[in-house]
Amino acid sequence: MNESFSTDRDRFSGRFAVIAAAAGSAIGLGNIWRFPYVTGENGGGAFLIIYLFIVFAIGIPVMTSEFVIGRAGQKNPYGSFKNLAPGKPWYLIGLMGVVAAFMILAFYTTVSGWTLEYVYQTLTGNLQGKSDAELTGMFDVFLKGSFRPVLWFLIFMGFTAFIILSGVKNGIERYTKFLMPLLIVLLIALSIRSVTLEGSKAGLQFLFNPDFSKITPKVILEALGQAFFSLSIGMGTLITYGSYIQKNENLGSSALFVCVADTAVAVIAGIAIFPAVFALGGSPASGTGLVFIVLPVIFQKMPFGQLFELLFFILLAVAALTSTISVLEVIVAYLVEELKMTRRKATIAATLMVSVLGIITVLSMGSLSKFLVFGKNIFGLLEYLTSNIMLPIGGFFIVLFIGWFFSPARTKAELTNDGKLKAGYFPVFLFIVKFVAPVAIAMVFLYSLGIFKF
Ligand code: PHE
């Protein structure tokens, strides 16, 4: 009796650490910065419905599959595939994940740097008493300047490297445990202020009243990309974290919880942003700067707004940090395990390489903005290639691997912890990873390329 009680307790706290780390990776700028701006550019309500459908039909199975591959393979994404499928080319998926990690870090850390600028601006009182137009102008001026965005980028990259180096991931978990709920509480407070602004109703309608005529192939591809990006799936972050998960933890329920929490935060962020956008007469399709322009305006209209604003941007920076460390960890784990570098060397090498690409990315929002590839600046290009192309391709092969290559018995053993857990969902899961998820991802691709029509 006593013994089973104590194992239950151990299990619970263990599971919490996993969920905290994976949720820390998933919840970040993808939810609070990217979700609102992409939803805004893709028509609102109808996009949201497709997004939700993709999270549940594709996202949860891909995340679960990544956990299975990581915990069974016990290595970085490349090494895990090599372990589970020796002599077969599946490791290429892991390799693509490592490449994607470089690309994501370059633009993600750029935006993380913006959060630091806003922490700084709030601290110095520079945002206080500014008009809506002045606040918009400040963001543009900041972005076009070269020095400060680069500086913040490097500082943020430094924080990320420091945490990976000192291996204080456990410490981070301890903080995220209460900082993330606090961020959510603040987001809810912002939402309340936002929906009580005059003229905000149209914003709620925009988000929750689907206009299906707005659905185009592009909208569906964007929803797919946003889901993968927001859930941190398709590039091996959760394979890497999966390899650190203890053998007695429940992979299926962890994935479910992370996906639900991640989606909830995105929707709350939407409720905080869109009513305010409409109340202030702005356009929901204002692009990457959307939340950095809108949120400071709402804070101006709240009691103790400056205090809330300071807290909010600090917490947003922390949320971004728990995501950047999960991406850098993919590269470092690869360098350490495959190229036999020390953790220190690997971290420094990865940080330097990311920084070179990152500085170019930062400048592509300003002085290099005339340099376009496929009509996109470097920032936009990296964002598009990773979220809309590489992550879905990675996810496609990840479910294919679990559905068709890896033995169902071994998958079941991982999901039930060798029969210790019930996993009544297993047949459904297997059906989804065999058929539903790969077909859905392939269809979205072919549809958006115009090869396939509904
Ligand atoms: N999911 C993170 C976010 O929403 C970003 C991320 C993408 C992290 C891919 C890891 C891998 O902020």
Image (cartoon, rainbow, N blue to C red):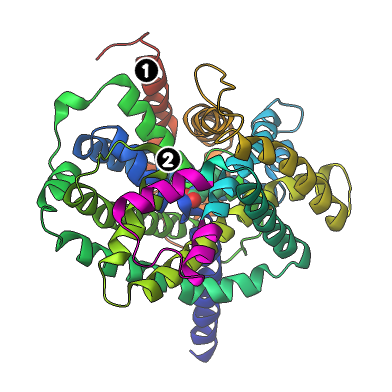
Element at badge 1? helix
Which residue is the site of mark 1?
Answer: 448
Q: Which residues are magenta?
A: 115-142
> Does residue 358 show up?
yes
Q: Which mark is residue 288?
A: 2
Instruction: Quadrant for residue 39, please give it.
Output: top left
Q: Is residue 158 above or below residue 57?
A: below
> Looking at the image, which residue is at 51% across and 31% down?
380
Element at badge 2? helix
Instruction: Quadrant for residue 357, please give it.
Output: top right
Residue 426: image x %, image y %?
41, 47
Q: Is residue 443 above or below residue 278?
A: above
Front-most of residues 405 and 149: 149
Left or right: residue 91 versus residue 433 is right
- Category of crowding for the residue at label 1, using alpha-carbon neighbours closer than 10 angstroms: few (below 14), some (14–19), many (at least 20): some
Residue 38: image x %, image y %?
35, 38
Left or right: residue 192 versus residue 291 is left
Q: Earlier in the sequence, mark 1 or mark 2?
A: 2
- Category of crowding for the residue at label 2, using alpha-carbon neighbours closer than 10 angstroms: few (below 14), some (14–19), many (at least 20): some
Which residue extends farthest top?
451
1 or 2: mark nearer the eye: 2
Front-most of residues 10 and 195: 195
At label 1, the amino acid type is Ser
Which residue extends farthest bottom?
2
Front-most of residues 176 and 161: 161
> Looking at the image, which residue is at 74% across and 36% down?
82
Q: Is residue 8 above or below residue 373?
A: below
Front-most of residues 447 and 302: 302
> Looking at the image, which residue is at 49% across and 18% down?
375
Residue 153: image x %, image y %?
64, 51
Left or right: residue 167 versus residue 304 is right
